[in-house]
Amino acid sequence: ILALAVAGTLGVTLSGWLGRWHWAADLFNHFRVQYLIAAAVALALCLALRRWKLAGIATAAVAINAASVLPLYHGTQARPLAADTPTLTVASVNLQFANGDHDAVERYLQASTADIIALIELTWEHLSAIEAMDLPYRMAVAEPADHAFGIGLLVRDTLSDGVSVQDVRPRMIGPDHIVRLAVEADLTVGDEAVRLLAIHPPPPTRPWAWRNRNDILAETGRLAAAADRPVIVVGDFNTTPWSPAFADMLEAGGLMNTQRGFGVQGTWPLGRRVPFTIPIDHCVVSGEWAVLDRRVGPSTGSDHLPLTVTLALRPAG
């Protein structure tokens, strides 16, 4: 049984390396934390039972997965920021299209300190409920749907000092045959023009959906690279940072993952508490940004936890 457990853990770990070429293999990439825990437990048992060959295999599984997970816990700001540096706080909230707990949504929105909130899986029912709430936000754009791919953007009535919003608009993103709604916003932070994009690719549970998700992430990278200003991308990406599509997006767009230095911070599925959650809700940014804070929760009644990130533009030079 121990040999099967060790071989199985290493097998699923290595299977993820084929994820660039096959949708099913890519699914194995998303559970690096779980593989790391399983491999560590198996290694401890191998050592306790003096199964040295199996211990060597388990060590390989631990090392491979640790190399993916542990870098998320390391990261520093390159330069100190002045006390008067303007900050921008953004949030991504996947409401879950079937979520009827509007009281939980209202509690979260009332307590939120975010300047901008991307609403993922926004339905007509959600929109009606939110519009009836007495919130410190206005609905800058709303594209609700009766399925999981509605989207909207809330903007705080009183933004942080030095932050203003010039324009918010829906945007179609993805290949011509399967496009998805996104939201694009032009902001000013201090003296800098900023571009924000909120996205929601489909979950990669079918070959066509996997290709569509990868296409949207690739286009997101191209849009970030083409922008003439600092960029922020938030939303439910339906991928963990260990998928090749996520890494390709970062590289193509010159983007960085705000998880670095803050850890895994799993956001889905809520019902399977840590260590069984995986991080699929993200905020990635261009290199001009310093990440001051990043946190998940509390629950909004959805199967996702909301993500909130506080950013500041790094000093030039």
Image (tube, grey):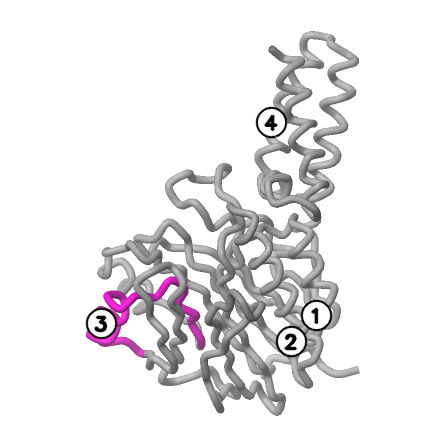
Sequence-first disc among 4 and 1: 4
| Foreground pick, 253 / 21 | 21
The kind of residue tagged 3 is Ser
For the point 32% across and 56% down, the residue is: 300
Estimate the spatial distance between the alpha carbons at disc 2 and disc 3, rounded to whole Å: 32 Å
Circle 4 or circle 2, nearest the eye: 2
Point out which mark residue 128 bears: 3
Quadrant where the C terminus lies?
Answer: bottom right
Circle 3 or circle 4, nearest the eye: 3
Sequence-first disc among 2 and 1: 2
Circle 4 or circle 1, nearest the eye: 1
For the point 51% across and 79% down, the residue is: 184
What segment is highlighted magenta in the picture? 116-136
Sequence-first disc among 4 and 2: 4
Specify whether 98 is left or right of 276.
Answer: left
Tell me whether circle 3 and circle 4 mark residues in contact (CB < 8 Å): no
Sequence-first disc among 3 and 4: 4
Estimate the spatial distance between the alpha carbons at disc 1 and disc 3, rounded to whole Å: 36 Å
Sequence-first disc among 2 and 3: 3
Residue corresponding to mark 1 = 253
Residue corresponding to mark 2 = 223
Point out which mark residue 33 bears: none
